[in-house]
Image (spheres, rainbow, N blue to C red):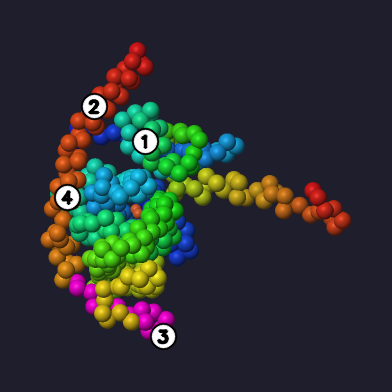
Amino acid sequence: MKDINISELERKFQEKIDKDIKIEPKDWMPDDYRQTLIRQISQHAHSEIVGMLPEGNWITRAPNLRRKAVLLAKVQDEAGHGLYLYSSVETLGANREETIDDLHSGKAKYSSIFNYPTVSWADMGAIGWLVDGAAIMNQVPLCRCSYGPYARAMVRVCKEESFHQRQGFEIMAQLAKGTPVQKEMAQDALNRFWWPSLMMFGPNDAESKHTAQSVKWKIKRHTNDELRQMFVDATVPQAELIGLTIPDKDLKFNEETGHYESGAINWDEFWEVVKGNGPCNKDRVDTRRKAKEDGMWVVEAANAYAEKRNRRKSA
Amino acid sequence: MSKKEWPLWEIFIRSKAGLNHKHVGSLRAADAEMAVENGRDVYTRRSEGISIWAVESKDVYASDPTEADSLFEPSDSKVYRHPTFYDVPDGISHM
Ligand SMILES: [Fe+2]
Ligand SMILES: [Fe+2]
């Protein structure tokens, strides 16, 4: 191995990527590729875990037993998604607990959408429809990501996501054809979640410094703006169908291109939330940190129990 | 933060009778019993399995990918192990 130089290894690596041969944990990979994946997958994992909080907020107040069972199953799935992802980040040699501690110290990021509060039941509809909808747009191409364990986790995640979006849309559709107050509630949730959902795809391509390299490595298959456009094109007709209005006065359909054109995104708001100044940033991270600290006795008790059982077995 | 982390386990699932257990991913658990229980919650929320194996990750001995070429060469070079190597005269349809 010693006598093969790095540039030769890198050339062979890129050759595999170009031929769509997956990279597996024990294969040689450039350090930047590894670090990029560790950052991206752990942030993705944190987003799944923090993403349980805004919805968990409504489980006890779901309007009926059906909605409650559905929401509970959805939130459990998000926990599962987080675990698949922590499992794939560990295949890269990262330590799971360290990545979690990075979340708790504020060093690691997660999707900024989860820093918005969920103030009404309709927000459960808006989140499932828009936030999971946007997540699906992001995650479907990741099923073909060059890193095997991440791609396989995404296949599993995507299979589970489709019910998440449907249950959210169902909530919105039902509220939209309910009483005027219910319809107003749905419209209000759409008004608050529309723009933050568009921001989920990240900065415009011109501002996105990692995109080119990630595309070359086939970690990313589409740019942020391409994915955002796909989401807008898919979602606007859905809103129309249930009689809700997208809160964008500049939104219009371009007959020539066959695409919707959106108004300008408020990127100042996006960067403020990313920097930690969103409505719920502090609350979300504090809640996660407290969950770990308060749960630490469980970790230790389980260790003690496992040791006791092992001793008994070997005696 | 934790003094001692739970070990890592590789989880294998048999999706239905008649099929092999297949690797699905890994998880953390204090011991084997917990690994099976966690495996159920993490990897079988939609009836994906009827049986679970949990193997501690440190016990998996894996082949070295840099030696894959030499390791698998003996089988790559034996084309006569495949039925397509042989000529079957016209007129014989099932063999
Ligand atoms: Fe998810
Ligand atoms: Fe989801």
Sort mark 3 into few (<14), some (14-19) or many (20+) by Cα contacts within 10 Å: few
- How far apart are the two marked residues, 3 and 4, measured between alpha carbons? 45 Å
Three-letter residue code for mark 1: Asn
Q: Could you tell me what secondary structure mostly forms the magenta stretch? A: loop
In front: label 2 or label 3 = 3
Q: Which mark is residue A285?
A: 4
Q: Relative to residue A28, is residue A255 depicted above or below?
A: below
Q: Which mark is residue A255?
A: 3
CB-based contact (under 8 Å), mark 2 and mark 1:
no
The reply to the same-chain question for discs 2 and 3 is: yes
Q: Which mark is residue B38?
A: 1
- How far apart are the two marked residues, 2 and 1, measured between alpha carbons? 16 Å
Q: Position of residue A290 (x, y in %)?
A: 16, 41
* Marked residue chain, label 2: A
CB-based contact (under 8 Å), mark 3 and mark 1:
no
In front: label 3 or label 4 = 3
- For the N terminus of chain B, the quadrant is top left
Q: Which residues are magenta?
A: A253-267
Which circle's residue, 2 or 3, is located before the other in the chain? 3
